[in-house]
C-alpha cells in the first residue's frame, strides 16, 4: 500500500481520498480551507497543515483542485511543490484544467526528474463516493502502470488515452456532451410541461427508449423537484466550457452546440446560479417559458 498526499478535499476530493484510505493506502490530506482536512481525520485521513507536509514522503501526490490557477499555485508557482518534489514521486492531477497548462507544468516537473499524469474524472459526486469514476489518463505508459492500482481504488473505468494533456482533452469532450445533454433534458421537460403533460411521466417515457441519458437518470429528479443544489456547480461547468471553446478555437474546430449551451450557462450565472448545480439550467427554461 502506498503513502499518498491528497491536495484539494472539496466535493469530489474528499470522497476520492476516503476511498483511497478505505483501500488501505496511507492518505495525508490538505485543503487550503482550514479545518477541512482535520474534519476527515476520524475517517482515516491524516491532516496536513500545508502543501509541503502533504507531499513529504508521498509516493503519489494527487491534486483535485478547481481550475488551472490553483493547480499552478500548488505545483509551479513560487511556494509550490516544484522545488520539493523528488524523482521517485509521481504527481497525478485529477482536476479538470487546461491541457496546454498541463503540458507546461509536466515539462517543468520533468526538468526535475518528476513524472506527472493528468487524470481528470467523470461520474459526479455519486461516482466519487461509490469509487465508480471514469478516469481518463494522459502521460507516460510507465507512470500510468505505476498509478493504475491507486486510480482503480477511485474509479471503475481507468483508461490511458495517450500523452500528457490528452486526459484533459478527452475530459473537455466529455463535458460538452454533458452540457448539451443537460440542455436537451431541460428543453424536453419545458416543452412537455408547457403542453400540459406531467413532466415526471414525460421523463419516465424518455428514459425507456433511445432518449435516455445519465442526465435524465441522475439530474432528472432534481429538475422535477426544482432542486437547484450542487453537485457540480454551474461555475465549474462554465470553466470547462471555456476550456473546450479555447481548445476548439486553437484547433480551428467549430462547435456550434457548445457555443449555444455556453450562452445558456452564462445566462444562468448572470441570474446568480453560479454556485448551484448544473441542473439549474432548468431555471433558464423556466424564465424563457414564464414559469
Ligand atoms: P470543490 O471546489 O468542491 O473542491 C476543490 C477544493 O480545492 C476546495 O475544497 C478548495 O478549498 C481546495 N483548494 C483550492 N485551492 C487550493 C489550494 N491552493 N491548495 C489546497 N486546496 C485548495 O470542487 P470539486 O467539485 O471537488 O471539483 C474539483 C475538480 O474536479 C474541478 O476541476 C472540477 O471541474 C472537477 N470535477 C468535478 C465534478 C463534480 O461533480 N463536482 C465531477 C467531475 C470533475
Image (spheres, helix red, strand yellow):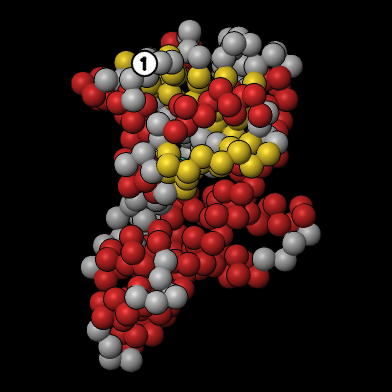
Q: Secondary structure at mark 1?
A: strand
Task: Please say whether residue 92 is visible from this viewpoint.
Answer: yes
Q: Quadrant of residue 262?
A: bottom right
Along the line of sight, the residue nearer the viewer: 273 or 216: 216
Counting from the top left corner in percent of width and height, residue 285 is at 40, 76
**Residue 106 in picture, x, y percent from top left:** 68, 27
For image coordinates 59% across by 34% down, the residue present is 118
Residue at 71% from the left image edge and 19% from the top image edge: 110
Q: Residue furthest left?
A: 42
| Quadrant in which residue 48 is drawn | top left
Residue at disc 1, CB closer than 8 Å to ligand 1: no
Residues 51 and 2: in front is: 2
Quadrant of the snapshot with the N terminus: top left
Residue shown at 32% from the left, 47% from the top: 126
Is the residue 289 above or below the residue 168 in the image?
A: below
| Residue 187 image-quadrant placement | bottom left
Q: Residue at x 51, y 35 (%)?
A: 94
Q: Could you say where residue 227 lies in the image, as x and y percent from the top left?
A: 26, 62
Describe residue 249's horizontal placement relative to residue 190 as left or right. Answer: right
Q: Is residue 290 visible?
A: no
Quadrant of the drawing holding the C terminus: bottom left
**Relative side of 196 to 260, left or right:** left
Residue 162 vertical placement versus 87 (above, below): below
Q: Residues within 10 Å of mark 1 (few under 14, many from 20)?
A: some
Query: How many callouts does the rendering have?
Result: 1
Furthest toward the bottom, the residue is: 195
Give residue 229's position: percent from left, percent from top.
Answer: 29, 55
Which residue is denoted by mark 1 in the rendering?
Answer: 26
Amino acid at each position: 500500500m502506498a503513502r499518498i498526499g491528497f491536495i484539494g478535499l472539496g466535493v469530489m476530493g474528499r470522497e476520492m481520498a476516503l476511498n483511497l484510505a478505505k483501500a488501505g493506502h496511507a492518505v495525508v490530506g490538505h485543503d487550503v480551507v482550514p479545518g477541512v482536512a482535520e474534519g476527515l481525520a476520524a475517517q482515516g485521513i491524516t491532516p496536513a497543515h500545508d502543501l509541503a507536509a502533504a507531499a513529504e514522503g508521498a509516493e503519489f501526490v494527487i491534486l483535485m483542485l478547481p481550475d488551472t490557477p490553483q493547480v499552478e499555485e500548488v505545483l509551479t508557482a513560487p511556494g509550490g511543490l516544484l522545488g520539493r518534489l523528488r524523482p521517485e514521486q509521481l504527481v497525478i492531477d485529477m482536476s479538470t484544467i487546461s491541457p496546454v497548462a498541463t503540458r507546461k507544468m509536466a515539462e517543468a516537473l520533468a526538468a526535475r526528474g518528476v513524472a506527472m499524469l493528468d487524470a481528470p474524472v467523470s461520474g459526479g459526486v455519486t461516482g466519487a463516493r461509490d469509487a465508480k469514476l471514469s478516469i481518463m489518463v494522459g502521460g507516460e505508459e510507465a507512470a500510468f502502470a505505476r498509478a493504475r492500482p491507486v486510480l482503480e481504488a477511485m474509479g471503475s473505468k481507468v483508461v490511458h488515452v495517450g500523452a500528457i494533456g490528452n486526459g484533459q482533452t478527452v475530459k473537455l469532450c466529455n463535458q460538452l456532451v454533458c452540457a448539451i445533454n443537460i440542455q436537451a433534458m431541460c428543453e424536453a421537460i419545458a416543452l412537455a410541461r408547457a403542453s400540459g403533460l406531467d413532466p415526471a411521466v414525460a421523463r419516465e417515457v424518455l428514459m425507456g427508449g433511445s432518449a435516455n441519458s445519465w442526465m435524465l437518470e441522475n439530474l432528472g429528479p432534481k429538475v422535477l423537484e426544482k432542486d437547484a443544489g450542487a453537485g457540480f456547480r454551474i461555475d465549474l461547468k462554465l470553466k470547462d466550457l471555456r476550456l473546450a471553446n479555447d481548445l476548439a478555437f486553437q484547433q480551428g474546430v467549430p462547435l456550434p452546440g457548445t457555443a449555444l449551451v455556453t450562452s445558456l450557462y452564462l445566462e444562468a450565472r448572470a441570474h446568480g446560479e453560479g454556485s448551484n448545480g448544473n441542473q439549474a439550467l432548468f431555471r433558464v427554461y423556466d424564465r424563457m417559458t414564464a414559469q
